[in-house]
Amino acid sequence: MITFSNINFQYNNNKTDKGNLADINLTIQDGELIVLTGESGCGKTTFTRLINGLAPNYYPGTLTGELLLDGENIIGKSVAELGRTVGSVFQNPRSQFFNVDTDSELAFAAENIAMDPKEIIRRLDEVTEDLELKDLRQRSIFELSGGEKQRIACGSVAVMHPKVIVLDEPSSNLDSESIDKLKCVLKKWKKQGKTIVIAEHRLFFLKDLADRLVVMKDGRITNIYDRAEMNDLSGSLKAMGIRPLEEPELCIKRSKEGIRDFIRIEHFKYSYDRKTTALFIEKMLLPGHQVVAIVGQNGAGKSTFLKCLCGIYKTGKDKILLNNTRWKRKERTKNCYMVFQDVNHQLFTESVLDELLIGMDDSLNESEKKEKALDILERFGIKDKAGDHPMALSGGQKQRVAIASSVAAGRDIILMDEPTSGMDELNMMRLSAELKRLKEMGKTIYVVTHDYEFINECCDSVIKLS
Amino acid sequence: MKKYEVKDLINIGIYTALHFLCIFIVAMIGFIPQTFAFAGIIEGFLGAIPIMIFLTKAKKFGMITIMGVLLGLITFLMGRPWPCLVIGLAAGLITDFVWMKAEFKKIKYGPLCCGLMMLWLAGMGLPLFFGYRDSYLANLEEGYGKEYVEVIRSLTPDWMFIVTIVIGVVGGFLGGLFAKRILRKHFAKANLVE
Amino acid sequence: MRKLDPRTKLLLLVVINVVMMTGKITGIFVPVRIVFALIPFVLMMRETWFRGSFIYFFLYLYVFIFERFTLQDIHPVLLIVLLFTTGLFSRFLAGVMMAYYLMKTTTVSEFVTAMERMHVPKAIVIPFAVMFRFFPTLKEEWQDVKNAMKMRGIGLAGRNPLDVLEYVMVPILMSVSKIADELSAASMTKCLSVDGKRTHIARIGFSFLDVVLVLCAAAGLFAHLFLGGVIGT
């Protein structure tokens, strides 16, 4: 049983660590599955960090109040000590594994507490069976997809037989198939009687599993709903800036706008090396002047498709036509702009303004460029950040800077790779509005996404890759 | 000496890896490593950048020394002669002392530290200069005559070894200056570093 | 086929390195050098790396012959090149091959296990493991940044190379810094600590071949140190 009594927590470093907590009082029963949700910065991640000890040990701050785990006060215990009973699964599959191969990663925590190797191996086999990891054993972690990495992360937690498991936005980077698998893991753990605390934005996969839904805002708990109450919620959640509990059906109105065969692809092939073909498209029509969603299972090559389209990847002999004229790779690089899933890789300069300026062509002089850039920033609502360093902004703001740069660079076709990963309702709606505005400016937008709510909100067509 | 934390050890690993890759990439592109003077300066320059960032995270004595040990170890595992281990350790230790004198925070000593750290590269260049010139050639002299042996000796004289090391150090220093500017321009501005 | 213990491979690397580099090449050291040169060859053959083994074999054969017989009537420049390369190979080729073999046949986990069994301090083992875990990640990061630059049209053309270097390094450094933070947090929740004992599931241990090789190495080293193998003695 976990008991929060009058917990207040302030991060020391308020510039980078957001999500202070105030007056938290909550008791979590053994075997309960609690879902914490709320807008970005509401404190749900901080909540999980208190349980596994990362706050205040790793993210320093002032903590008052009492936090009991099975009657014992865990404030003051080290993260490593708590790690024996509390397992943690994090948001980013890429940065939470320490080892190079899956078996070592699964055994890692157990090795760290000097468990007998025979016992470790026994538990490895047990967890492999339980969580269906057989196809992932003895492989290099670098070959795995995001979803597979997350399954290994869950496996490495399970080996420790923890009483409590906290998960911080575990579904952020996952596609629907992987989310289903995650759901199975959670079901299994619930059956084993583990206490589970999940901080999440996307709630639909948790609807049948959650015992209680805890809504937070500005570091406080505002609402708590139990199973019965959760069924009546849909409307009110949206008003609170939270994603719905039900996964929406894909339902977009067939749009009459735009050009139907803006881009015609006749022969399109991409291979990593001479042997494996990653992508092969015989014939495809892409609409123009619309917001088009591109969906498909993981591994279908959606990201690869985008990268080939904008000219990052060489496709060999291809035949792609734009408005019925041959569209070569060099042209594609000039016309297209891609917003990556990890925007950090595409921000290079020391100020938001510079970020827009470096992409602009030289037909304007310095002051004209600056004026135009500030104008664009105004339209995107970030003019006041013009002098700030791009890396100091929030995730949503960084994304806006990237999109603003595309407008500044005068590129008409914008490609986006999973832009709503880990986004709360508010930011998702804001992005939808932005994309609709871009469409009105005459741009064409292709979005790879599996966020059905988002698609319903702003997309005109959907294309499925398989 | 303050105790290390997990974060410190992970930082050592990451920045050593990044530093090594910077050097390695130049060595791959630049022709024969260590005999080509330019290679040293570029390696030093590029390699200094991760080191500078690492310095801002190295707040305890010994971290840079461990970096040196690891670099020496990798050099050894690549098949270079065993003195490279000692050289790596020495380079790390010297740099660590200088950074300690700078109280682990006076960034104006940063470029100097970057330069000194490049001393570990001497280990990589050992095969070309040592181990076979004198003794080995002495054995061959009987067969080939002094003149040939002299020519060989003159191809890789001792002073050239010193020169390549110095070039590496200078490259490191210059790279450190460049990296200092990056630190100020980006990291300080984005509040990612003290 | 039973794998060699990493510690054996490490010992071989050290001994081969020392003996080949500073040892005399005459007298009893001829067979010593031959044996040591052959060890990597045999090990590589055992792994069925035929192409590599044969190239290595022929290179050493060339060295061996060249050391014994003097060639007359050869163009002086060619002779210089031959002398240079012979020296280099004779001293260092075996060591390099042994090192290559070690790296290719030992996984990071096995290496870490061996180091911890040898009581290497955690302060060295952990960073070592992290290094190897990061090489592929850094490659991925670099490719991502390179793609982004390509997409945005930021290349070497018409720009100050130092600016381009800045554009490349800054995102990588920032990203790496973030990954370091997240990895540290995650590792701590998995009970990683800077002190304390660890166990290992990687199986390493000595077999008959290990013993044979260790004895060879010991014998060679003994001859080198005590039977006047060091140059200058």
Image (spheres, grey):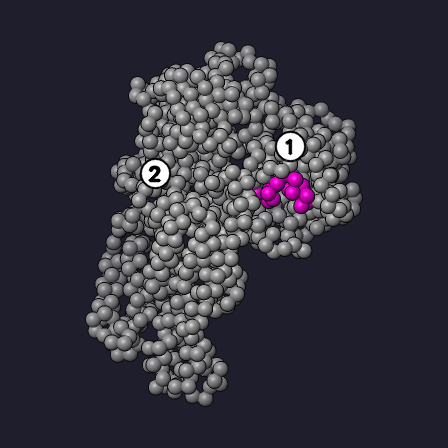
Chain letter of the residue beneath label 2 in the structure image: C
Residue at image location 39% in from the left, 40% down from the top: B7
From the top left corner, tell me how far across and down residue C155 is, in percent: 64, 52
**Placement of B189 over or under B34, stated as above or below:** above
Compared across the picture, whether A93 is left or right of C205 comes to right
Name the residue located 71 percent from the left edge and 41 percent from the top edge. A370
**In the rendered structure, which amino acid carries the disc numbered 1?**
Asp
Q: Nearer the viewer, residue C178 or A252?
A: C178
Q: Which disc is residue C192 wearing?
A: 2
**Residue extent of the magenta highlight:** A345-359
Label 1, on which residue? A384
Q: CA distance from mark 1 to mark 2?
A: 43 Å
A172 part of magenta stretch: no
- Residue A52's x, y, as percent? 38, 28
Q: Chain of mark 1?
A: A
Viewport quadrant of the N terminus of chain B: top left
- Look at 51% across and 11% down and name the residue there: A229
Residue at screen point 47% across, 37% down:
A93
Q: Nearer the viewer, residue C102 or C187?
A: C187
Side of B78 where A281 appears, left or right: right
- Find numbered disc 2 in the image and state the secondary structure of the residue it sits on: loop
Q: Amino acid at mark 2?
A: Leu
Q: Is residue A399 above or below residue C202?
A: above
Q: Are marks 1 and 2 in contact (CB under 8 Å)?
A: no
